[in-house]
Image: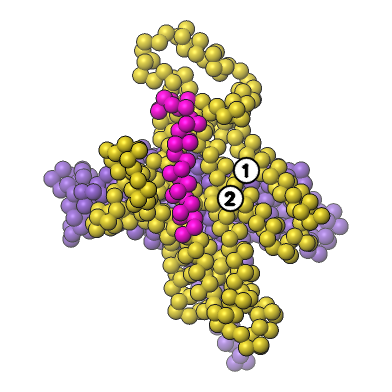
Chain colours: A purple, B yellow
Amino acid sequence: MQAGNEAAAHDLKRRRSDKRLIWLPLTALIALLAFGIYSNEQVMVNLQLRNQAPGLTHIFGTDWLGRDLFFRTMSGLTRSLTIGLIAALLSTLLAVIFGILSWWHTKIDMVIVWLADLLLSLPHLVMLLLLSFAMGGGMKGLIIGLTLTHWPKLYRLLRSEILQINESPFIHVSRQLGKTKSWIAGNHLLILLLPQIVVGFVLMFPHAILHEAAITFLGFGLPPEQPAIGSILSEAMGFLTAGIWWMALFPGLILLATVLSVDWYGRLLGKKLQVKGGHHHGG
Amino acid sequence: MRTMKLCKVILRKCLRLGLLLIGVSLLSFMLVKSSPIDPVRAYVGADMMTVSPEQLERISSYWGLGQNPLTQFGHWLRAVLQGDLGTSTIYRASVADLIAERFGATLLLTGGAWILSGVLGFLLGVFSGLNPDTFIDRTVRLYCYVLASSPGFWIGLLFLLFFAVHLGWFPVGLGTPAGLLSAEVTWMDRLHHVMLPIATLSILGVANVALHTREKVIEIYQQPFIQFARAKGINGLKLFRLHGFRSVLLPAVSMHFASFGEIFGGAIVAEQVFSYPGIGQALVEAGLGGDIPLLLGMVLVSALFVFVGNLLADILYVAVDPRLRKGAV
């Protein structure tokens, strides 16, 4: 009896911590986005306070137009997060659809595999640059570019997973029972792949943010009145020799902290959901 | 017999990668064509007011812009195969010449970073793999995870800030000292300028190799032949030198070849940070300035970088590893 109670208590604890694993990051994200909107309103040009070193009133210092760097960074971070979030969501969706399509028919599979190879045969950043150029830049071009370049790795993972599941007895049974392909896809594949998909999405998110930062740093994508972390750092480049170190240090640090925490959360989730091969690297 | 088989495998890989290369050029050609930039307008530039609509029409038909895009691609591909990549609209110079001029600089940067990060990453990976879950191992792993999540350009900026601006050890930018003729530039000058970008790229490139090597070391040390060697009384560095080294080296080197493209991608950003005149900088300028011939040329060169890296990785696997040579291929 004692053992059973303990097991139940343990189970309850585990379930509680599982729930916390979902709502804590979600709340954090929403709070961050809300703070970003607030920050965006706090960014004001104040020419009397140009290039102030970090202090009590401006904890990150100010830039060459006297704008508070902390609020500007947070506003930029929100923009980067939003873009990364949308792109990672769309890209995950694309990977799932392509994965299922690959399973549907071998001819489609050949085409998609080749397409994935094609997209991976250019350095990631070059492909992104090309796509963003072709779409004429802007927020839309950025999101399309990020979406189209991030699906292949997750797709490969899902595809090999589906190949494995496809050999399971219950799939054979379903087929023998005359279930349609779409039924099997919806009732077996998608449900079994759900942990992979969720973890893949969370781990794709930091990649998307990093690439978004790199491409805006290079000057593609967003107009100057919409700061992203990348464009703030690219502005900072002009002030390095003047010794204005805070413009380069803090925005990057915030970006690093964000990426690290999302990545850490993704790994934790992968461990919890027992997803193998959860971490997929790539610059 | 064996060399025949090897040649066949290599030929097949070449064919597959060649097909991808053509695919990439078609894709980039179509993407660039679909961009909102009008090539005639970009070519004429500031003289737009003085050029009549008829002349614009004539330029457009001279270039064959009204033709079917696939025919245009055919023309372009034929010209590319003959070594004619067109004329850059920003530099007003032949794209092929520009590539030739910048290729060396980029090769020095990426090659240097590739070797340095490979050696460092391998060493770190071996050390942490040989001592799993010790302090060294944890430090190496933490370092790798943090660096895999750092934006490369930011690390470059910090390096620039600290080593070039604060300490003044290195020049702040460019590939050669300003105000010198190219004949007067010595190798030492070049090296002095390229060191900081190489350091930036290497520090980031280490993470992948190190983690991969670490996993391989741990995996191999569970194999029976290592346990047998241990039973015979070999241990420590001697054990690694005799039995571990070669088995770990191959996958590490092969993976490192395959990451050539990623290092090249990092070089684009590093070149921007350090105003280093390489392929990546030209690529960015071409993209921002709407210089289509230059953009296509640079995209082709970067595809070639990845292509060569992947090919070498594949060949290495087949040519060196006896297990793969016999069965799997």
The image position of residue A213, as x and y in percent, is 41, 48
Of residues B65 and B122, the one nearer the viewer is: B122
Question: Which portion, as a residue range, is magenta?
Answer: B87-116
Residue A233, horizontal then vertical, whole percent: 33, 48
Quadrant where the C terminus of chain B is found in the figure: bottom right
Residue that carries the numbered disc 1 in the rendered image: A118
Would you call the spot at circle 1 few (<14 residues within 10 Å), some (14-19), or many (20 or more)?
some
Q: CA distance from mark 2 to mark 1?
A: 15 Å
Identity of the residue furthest to the left in this view: A48
Q: Chain of mark 1?
A: A
Tell me the quadrant of the picture where the N terminus of chain B can be found: bottom right
Q: Quadrant of residue A257?
A: bottom left
Q: Residues within 10 Å of mark 2 (few under 14, many from 20)?
A: some
Q: Would you name the residue on which mark 2 appears?
A: B309
Residue B276 image offset from top left, x and y in percent: 37, 44
What subunit carries mark 2? Answer: B
Task: Say if residue A113 shows up in the picture.
Answer: yes
* Helix, strand or loop for disc 1: helix
Q: Is residue B82 above or below residue B115?
A: above
Q: Which mark is residue A21?
A: none
Residue at 62% in and 63% down:
B251
